[in-house]
Image (spheres, rainbow, N blue to C red):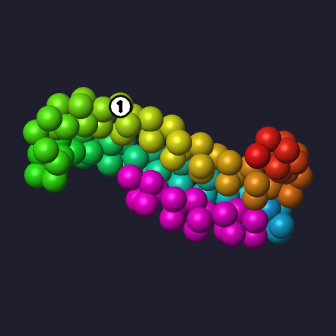
Amino acid sequence: MLWLVIPLAAVMYPRLVHSAAKAEKTNLMSVVLLTTGALAVVGALGLSWLGPWVVRLVYKPDFVAVASSLLPWYAAAIVPLALANVLLNNLLARPAASVVPRCACSA
């Protein structure tokens, strides 16, 4: 699921650095955040709907019940992770990013 939304943040980052360096106002952050949210929710719904069917094709029947019950929870947990990736890239793109030392020290 993250393969759908991480390229959006990767494209957004240099554009935000460029606009911050030139002190331009842009609504790119809100567009990318909304697009990422929409793609992540659609991906989560698709995984919750198609995931159990794919698990039945690939794994043994005793594993299907466990995996099918965990897939919606996994999909729901990935949506905030995708949005946090976009927000963190936005913070790192700003010129006065005081979040950089905090992220480096916590790693």
Residue 49 among magenta residues: no
**Which residue is painted at 19% across and 37% down in the image?**
63
Q: Which residue is drawn at 69% across and 69% down?
A: 14
Residue 23, above or below 96: below
Q: Which of the 4 image quadrants contains residue 27?
A: bottom right
- Residue 55 position within the rendered picture, expressed as x and y whole percent measured from the top left: 18, 46
Q: Percent x, y for residue 97?
A: 85, 50
At x 36%, y 39%, the residue is 75
Question: Which residue is identified by label 1?
Answer: 73
Q: Quadrant of the rendered structure where residue 48 is? A: top left
Q: In this view, does 13 lie to the left or right of 33?
A: right
Name the residue nearer the viewer: 51 or 31. Answer: 51
Tally the marks.
1
Query: Looking at the image, can residue 67 be seen?
Result: yes
Front residue (pair 78, 19): 78
Q: Tell which of 105 and 59 is nearer to you.
A: 59
Residue 12 inside the magenta-drawn segment: yes
Asked if residue 50 shows in the view, the reply is no
Which residue is at 35% across, 31% downward?
73
Q: What is the magenta range?
A: 1-18
As displayed, is residue 62 above or below residue 18? above
